[in-house]
Amino acid sequence: MVDAHQHVLRIGRHDYFWLQPGSAIHRDYGLEDLRPLLGGVTGTVLVQAAPSAEETQFLLEVAAASDGLVRGVVGWVDLAAPAAPDAIAALAGKPIVKGVRPMLGFIEDTGWILRPEIQPALKALAREGLRLDMPARPRHLPLLAELAERHPALAVVIDHGAKPAIARGEFDGWARDIAQVARDTLVFCKLSGLATEASTGWTDEELRPYVDHLVESFGPDRLMWGSDWPVVDLAGGFTRWREACLRLLPADLHAAVMGETARAFYGLDVPALH
């Protein structure tokens, strides 16, 4: 199994603007905290959680010291900066770097990713063979067809199923829009982050319609599982989320969704579990 979306945190850098003091996860998290939870997971993709070059460097250091656990890093680049293409080319020279992620959910302008000053960076990502992680919200989904049309060679994955507001019963509009993305583009999607959008004490049955819809929309070859650890600790934890997904996914899709799709999308070399 591959965890296609996990984080590490170093609170003392003070650049996790989204993480409030007093939060249950407002502390340092390292791979030593994750390893006891892994079970059959033999490789992870380490994803940025702060919009800073220091964050990307931190992830590279963690990956280098991970003894092969981290198979890919998704870092951060200021995509609006004139120097973004050069920064992207520099990152692409590091084989462990598989992509970059802008923090779209916290950018007020829904159409930011389509702004003219962002396009040179997106072209550079495609040219350098890096992927774009999209932490989209439902409001971003109608933009993805245009993004895909502008950059047909850019590999894109939607993080966290676009974070539908499960606890509020949001389904129909999200379901329509994400199915259209799946139908009209080659965009991938992560089966991650849903637990934190669900009710406190969520059940399999609360999540089932969302998981089923993502499976139906993207199929196993464009859907990949991620833990969103340690954020998932706010909603039951790594093990509870992983086991729920194993129950909710048809058994014949486990190999693809829980590992093979992430390996193919990110170009990972993940060793088998012995």
Image: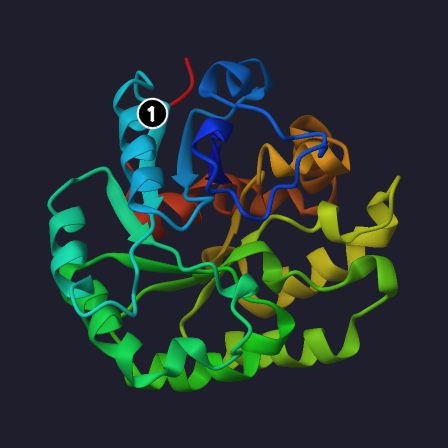
Task: Name the residue rendered at 55%, 84% in the picture.
Answer: 142
Can residue 213 be seen here? The reply is yes
Can residue 184 be seen here? The reply is no
Task: Name the residue rendered at 29%, 45% in the picture.
Answer: 53
Residue corresponding to mark 1: 62
Q: For residue 95, what is the image quadrant?
A: top left
Question: Percent position (x, y) of residue 61?
Answer: 28, 26
Question: Percent position (x, y) of residue 3?
Answer: 49, 36
Q: Nearer the viewer, residue 143 or 105?
A: 105
- Relative to residue 109, is residue 19 depicted above or below? above
Q: Nearer the viewer, residue 187 or 103?
A: 103
Q: For residue 175, what is the image quadrant?
A: bottom right
- Relative to residue 210, is residue 230 depicted above or below? above
How many C-alpha atoms fall within 10 Å of the one at disc 1: few (<14), some, or many (≥20)? Answer: some
Left-right relation of 150 to 5? left
Q: For residue 89, what is the image quadrant?
A: bottom left
Colour scheme of the picture: rainbow
Q: Amino acid at mark 1?
A: Val
Total number of numbered discs in the rendering: 1
Q: Secondary structure at mark 1?
A: helix
Task: Name the residue rendered at 47%, 30% in the picture.
Answer: 8
Q: Nearer the viewer, residue 269 or 155?
A: 155
Question: Percent position (x, y) of residue 144?
Answer: 46, 79
Question: Percent position (x, y) of residue 225?
Answer: 55, 45
Left-right relation of 79 to 90? right
Quadrant for the C terminus in the image: top left
- Relative to residue 182, is residue 222 depicted above or below? above
Task: Name the residue rendered at 35%, 29% in the picture.
Answer: 70
